[in-house]
Amino acid sequence: MLRGLLLALLALPLQAADRPPNVIVIIADDIGWGDVGCYGAKAFKTPHVDRLAREGIRFTDAYAPSAMCTPSRFALLTGEYAWRGGRPRGVLNGDSGLIIDPAGPTLPKLLREAGYTTGAIGKWHLGLGPREKGPAYNADLRPGPLEVGFGSFFGYSATNDRVPTVYIQDHRVVGLDPADPLRVIQGDGKMRSWAAGRERIGKAEGGKAAWWVDSEMGAALSAKAVSFIEANKERPFFLYYAPRNIHAPITPGKRFQGSTGAGVRADDIAELDWEVGEVLAALDRHGIAKDTLVIFTSDNGGGKADSPVHKVNGGLRGHKMSPWEGGVRVPFVVRWPARL
């Protein structure tokens, strides 16, 4: 749906003096249908996502391509369902190879061919390195985001509850000490290892100097998103921003801990909303909000996290990883002030 919508919007006739709009896709992690104010959340506030809805279009019948993250993100970037063509259908691990064909068409490639500067920031979760071999974390991590159409990448390989707990800049692990090489031995769900202050899925050794701090991830990734906007404000750009929030382990930044009074998950949603606000503020600051198409959505429905004061999926049946409505129906908000 998203790829088709983007291509349809970009095909709208522009005035002779107009340049193509900037495009920002914000794909949150595990945000359910009822997790933001404009879709009915009452126990806490999401003013920045609500602003997008107020100033744009709030879709009421939008669906993710899958009820879990890897296949949903694969479909978003390739336009193909993950269960076709022999693609892995499940969730990838930190030792998984790239599942997108570098020779095939992708959304960032199409936009780059149209003159866009492209960048990806945040959760990747589509594999790194040769598909059958996987990533070499102590060397160049290729193929990866750059080989499928992005001009730059800053983020992490899998999920924040999996090893390795390191950031990647383009093809290299950030801050890796050569004297303490990183070795991901196994990434399946049967093994656990201690990394960056907690137990994670998978087995890894080394790389301690490069470990992230869980509670600082939201601030670190949103700062990179703002820097990308500032560096490319003079020319059309496509930013694929995939925040950590609100995937487990749920670790909101210190300033958001206890901020909502509705629990740690609500605090993490508040941080996600703040990240959206940082992106919008950067657009306003540089005078490019009018000519920027911003899309906010989620990779799948929310998990089993209902509370007495909040329904994650707005009362829909099911949840993340289930075939019911709650597993695939997601928020989907579009704003483009110049045209919508």
Image (tube, rainbow, N blue to C red):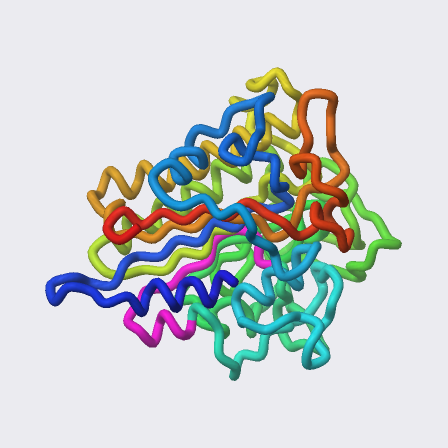
Report the side of 296 relative to 266 (left or right): left
Q: Quadrant of residue 144?
A: bottom right
Magenta stretch encompasses residue 60? no
- Relative to 272, is 166 above or below? below
Magenta stretch encompasses residue 112? yes
Front residue of 275/14: it is 14
Q: Which residue is outermost to the left? A: 17
Front residue of 100/161: it is 100
Magenta residues span 109-124
The percent position of residue 140, horizontal first and vertical second, equals: 55, 69
The percent position of residue 311, horizontal first and vertical second, equals: 68, 31
The percent position of residue 90, horizontal first and vertical second, equals: 75, 63
- Relative to 151, is 320 above or below? above
The percent position of residue 287, horizontal first and vertical second, equals: 20, 43
- Residue 207 visible, this angle: no
Q: Which residue is outermost to the front? A: 61
Residue at 74% x, 33% y is 305
- Relative to 77, is 161 above or below? above
- Residue 121 visible, this angle: yes
Residue at 61% x, 27% y is 266
Report the side of 69 relative to 104 (left or right): right
